Image (cartoon, helix red, strand yellow):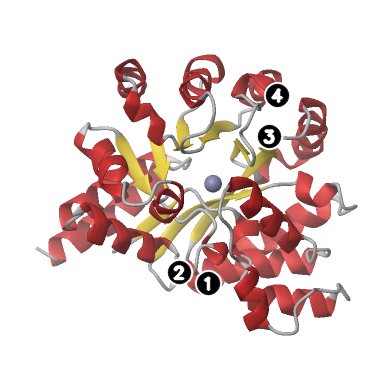
Amino acid sequence: MPKAELHVHLEGTLEAELKFELAARNNVDLPYVDVESMRASYVFHDLPSFLTIFYEGSFVLHHEEDFRDLVYAYLRKVASQNVIYAEMFFDPQQHTDRGVSFSTMIEGLTRGRIEAERDFGIRSQLIMCFVRERSAESAMAVFEMALPYRHLIVGLGLDSDELDNPPTKFAEIFRRGREAGFRLTMHCDVDQKNTHEHIRQAIEDIGVERIDHGANLLDRPELIEMARERGLFFTVCPYANEMMRPGENQSIARGMLDLGLKLTLNSDDPAYMEGNYINENMLMVHDLAGFGPDDFITVTRNAFDAAWIDDELRQELHRKLDAYAMASV
Ligand SMILES: [Zn+2]
């Protein structure tokens, strides 16, 4: 099925093979003798332990070519799963803090996108995320660095460790971002402290158009109503749900769909999640939450509607899905 992905962290697509290759290219010492032992290290048990492994990965990214290779490898992989459009998160603070310049990073990522479109026909855009456990000042500094590249970045997001880092900590940056024409989304991870208040802030105080994850909204009728009224989209990641709350994709993914919320399905950090890309995540809700062909068409239509693209491209994506749906009746 032609499809879109809207919730994937580029740094979370760094497969062990590429990490090894980049480490050799850039003379970075890694504490692993081979790809297999590195892959074995991609194991975590909660959000902080995941983030430790995840950030180690970014240490091998230094030059424009490295960022180009990262995005190109992800887009090549998902083009093979018939993803025809992707919006991809990147975290500049992971890189600028190590002395990588913003221009090196954005130019490499952009070149990878252009070359992947040329080679595989896949369209894509970038969403810049702020690392929420760092200060608002640090986020504002990268926001300022991004302004000259506004035309290369479609939206702003917020990710990483949510504990005691509420959406309103970044209210001023998101206000300025909206003024500058960026589209807005935010992570509200599953079962975090103060999750309901964080979801409310993201919707009411920040005015996001999407929530990344957002499962705990289902606990509160007033939040469900708010999301319905505003036509909010949810970028849900079945494998990540399974890690956080085993056995509950039925209640989360199926629950959102049954309530008429605008669910989309995504992969989050596939390299660190046992290589589960978007197809594998869709298979997971097929097996665990009873999703059938009509449900997959619904979530894919939602993703095309949620995409931050012009009407011409949106119609083109929908036409491809229509053709698929007609052919598979
Ligand atoms: Zn995420």
Dot 2 corresponds to which residue?
A: 79
Residues 93 and 30: in front is: 30
User: Which one is in front in this view, the residue at disc 3 or the one at disc 4?
Assistant: 3
As measured in the structure, the alpha-carbon distance from the residue carrying label 3 to the one carrying label 1 is 30 Å
As measured in the structure, the alpha-carbon distance from the residue carrying label 1 to the one carrying label 2 is 5 Å
The label on residue 318 is: none
As measured in the structure, the alpha-carbon distance from the residue carrying label 3 to the one carrying label 4 is 12 Å
Q: Looking at the image, which residue is at 40% across and 54% down? A: 4
Q: Earlier in the sequence, mark 4 or mark 2?
A: 2
Residues 212 and 319: in front is: 212
Q: Earlier in the sequence, mark 2 or mark 3?
A: 2
Q: Position of residue 31 (x, y in %)?
A: 79, 74
The label on residue 132 is: 3
The label on residue 76 is: 1
Q: Position of residue 86 (x, y in %)?
A: 49, 54
Q: Is residue 2 above or below residue 302?
A: below
Bin the neighbour count of mark 4 within 10 Å (Cα to Cα): few under 14, some 14-19, many 20 and up: many
Bin the neighbour count of mark 2 within 10 Å (Cα to Cα): few under 14, some 14-19, many 20 and up: many
Kind of element beneath mark 2: helix
Q: Looking at the image, which residue is at 54% across and 57% down? A: 269
Q: Position of residue 54 (x, y in %)?
A: 67, 57
For badge 2, the amino acid type reads: Ala
For badge 3, the amino acid type reads: Arg
| Tally of numbered discs | 4
The quarter of the displayed image where residue 174 is located: top right
Q: Earlier in the sequence, mark 3 or mark 1?
A: 1
